[in-house]
Amino acid sequence: MEIYNISVRTDKRTQLLDITKIISDFILKSPIAAGLCLVYSPHTTTGVIINEAYDSDVAFDINLFLNNLVPKNNSYRHTEGNSDAHIKASIIGNSRMLPYSDNKLNLGKWEGIFLCEFDGPRQRNINLILI
Ligand code: ZN
């Protein structure tokens, strides 16, 4: 098992950031040509998803839906003021497992990998764990 870390910058409070190219480029140079890549975001207010990257409106709509589903203001107790972000991160989950072979991700034609930012903008770490 090998663990690597990449860093990305988000630029909105909530957004789905397409990180497909960053991870594809990483896998292209991986010393292990085939296996599983765990994409893990070690934060309590982010998520990781795989979904359509071809039409960026899909990511926009998912973010819009989550913002409507989990309101920013509610009778939350958490004094940091970002309970909505913690709740969204809990719903989405902070990792996805990706198979790869011949140093290429086995993604579907329209699929991409997104870091879901729920409390940005911030610098975020993503662990890539090759198994
Ligand atoms: Zn918090």
Image (tube, rainbow, N blue to C red):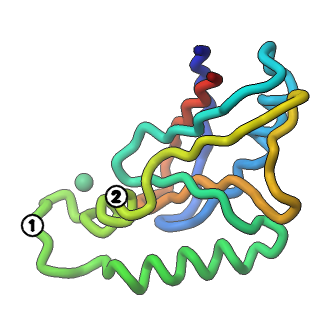
Q: Report x, y in % for residue 41.
A: 49, 41
**Of the residues under marks 1 and 2, which one precedes in the sequence?**
1
Q: Residue at x 57, y 19 (%)?
A: 3
Which of the 4 quarters of the picture holds residue 77? Answer: bottom left
Q: Report x, y in % for residue 80.
A: 20, 57
Q: Which residue occupies the foreground of this view, 14 or 21?
A: 21
Q: Is residue 44 left or right of residue 76?
A: right
Can you say which quadrant of the picture contains the N terminus?
A: top right
Q: Report x, y in % for residue 107.
A: 80, 51
Badge 2, how many Cα within 10 Å: few under 14, some, many 20+? some
Per the rendering, the mark at residue 13 is none
Q: Which residue occupies the foreground of this view, 40 or 102?
A: 102
Amino acid carrying label 2: it is Ser
Q: Is residue 19 left or right of residue 89?
A: right
Q: Residue at x 34, y 78 (%)?
A: 70
Marks 1/2: CA–CA distance: 17 Å
Q: Residue at x 78, y 16 (%)?
A: 32
Q: Please tell me whether residue 6 is drawn above or below residue 33 in the rendered image.
A: below
Q: Report x, y in % for residue 92.
A: 44, 61
Please state the quadrant of the image where ligand 1 appears. bottom left
Pointer 2: what residue? 90
The image shows a total of numbered marks equal to 2
Pointer 1: what residue? 77
